[in-house]
Image: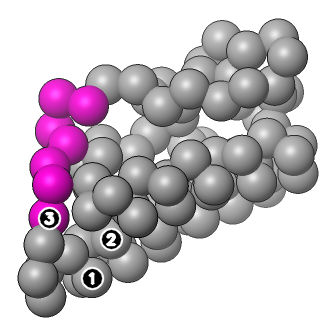
């Protein structure tokens, strides 16, 4: 099921942040962080989908893009946790 306020708890939020951290360690920027691209299974495993806009980055730009995406992930999770519009 897509990520929503109903299935986002601390454990799921940590799994989402860890998934993006692992991508970023590989210098991969997803490029389209939104709730619809994060699925949560019944067992609370997390799946990041839709890598159409993803790119492998390197050099100085890698740090900038990865930090920006990390902030976008945190903003999305914060909005969902606060019950704000997140789509």
Tell me the magenta residue range: 51-57
Number of numbered discs: 3
Residue 34's place in the image compared with 60, above or below, is: above
In this rendering, would 26 be left or right of 42?
A: left
> Marks 3 and 1, how far apart in space?
9 Å
Give 1 or 5, whichever is nearer the viewer. Answer: 1
- Residue for point 24% across, 82% down: 64
Measure the C-alpha gap from mark 3 to mark 2: 9 Å
Q: Are marks 3 and 2 in contact (CB under 8 Å)?
A: yes
Q: Which mark is residue 57?
A: 3
**Label 2, label 1: how far apart the Cα atoms are:** 5 Å
**Mark 2 = which residue?**
66
With respect to residue 47, does 5 lie above or below? below
Quarter occupied by residue 85: top right
Give left or right: position of 78 versus 32: right
Asked if the residue under mark 1 is in contact with the one under mark 2, i.e. CB atoms within 8 Å, the reply is yes
Give the residue displayed 38% in from the left and 78% down from the top: 67
User: Which residue was labeled with disc 1?
Assistant: 63
The answer to whether residue 77 is left or right of residue 42 is: left
Residue at position x 73%, y 26% in the image = 45
Q: Secondary structure at mark 2?
A: helix
- Tell me the chief SS of the magenta region: loop
Residue 28 place in picture, x, y as percent: 27, 54
In the drawing, does residue 8 fall left or right of residue 84?
Answer: right
Q: Residue furthest bottom?
A: 60
């Amino acid at each position: 099921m897509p990520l929503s306020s109903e299935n986002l708890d601390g454990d799921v939020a940590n799994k989402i942040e860890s998934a993006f951290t692992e991508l970023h360690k590989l210098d991969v920027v997803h490029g389209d962080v939104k709730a619809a691209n994060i699925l949560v299974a019944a067992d609370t495993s997390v799946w990041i989908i839709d890598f159409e806009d993803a790119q492998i980055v390197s050099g100085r730009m890698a740090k900038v893009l990865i930090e920006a995406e990390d902030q976008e992930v945190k903003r999305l999770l914060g909005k969902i946790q606060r019950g704000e519009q997140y789509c």
